[in-house]
Image: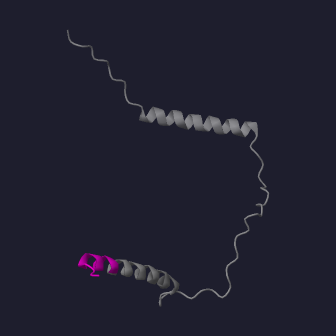
Amino acid sequence: MQISGLTRSAVVLLLLAGVAGCTSQIADLAEPVNAPARPAVEPAYPPVHDMPAARDTKPMTAAERQRLVDELSAARERQEAETAEPAQPKKTPAR
C-alpha cells in the first residue's frame, strides 16, 4: 500500500500540531528567569464580610438642604446668563 505525498504531509502536520499542543502546556509550568521571587507568606485576603465603621456625620437638616438648593439654582442661573446667546431678530422671507 502506497501513501501519497499529500497524505504523508497531512499526517506529519497532524503529528506536529499534537506535539506543539503538548509543549505549550509544559511551557506554562516554567517560570522565566527574571521573574520576581514569590513572597514567603501569602498576603491575606481583604475582609469582605466586615462592615465599615458607622459614620459620625449627621444627615442634613431641611434648612441646609434648602440653602444648598438655592445656591445651586443661583449658580445655574448665572451660568445660563453668561452663556446665553443674544436674541437674533427673525428674518422675514422676501416676497
In-front residue for pair 80/56: 56
Q: Residue 65 at what x, y percent from top left?
A: 70, 38
Q: Quadrant of residue 6?
A: bottom left
- Whether residue 39 appears in magenta in the rendering, the answer is no
Question: Which quadrant would the N terminus be assigned to in this image?
Answer: bottom left
Q: Is residue 11 above or below residue 86?
A: below
**Left or right of 45: which side holds 17?**
left
Range covered by the magenta-colored residues:
1-11
**Residue at position x 47%, y 84% from top?**
27
Q: Is residue 70 above or below residue 23?
A: above
Q: Residue 58 at what x, y percent from top left?
A: 78, 48
Magenta residues, dominant SS class: helix
Q: Quadrant of residue 49?
A: bottom right
**Left or right of 84: which side holds 65?**
right
Count numbered badges in the picture: 0
**Residue at position x 46%, y 32% from top?**
81
Spot the residue most to the left. 95
**Left or right of 25: which side holds 71?**
right
Q: Residue 46 at what x, y percent from top left?
A: 70, 70
**Residue at position x 37%, y 81% from top?**
16
In-front residue for pair 66/33: 33
- Whether residue 4 appears in magenta in the rendering, the answer is yes
Q: Quadrant of residue 19?
A: bottom left
In-front residue for pair 37/88: 37
Q: Residue 9 at what x, y percent from top left?
A: 28, 79
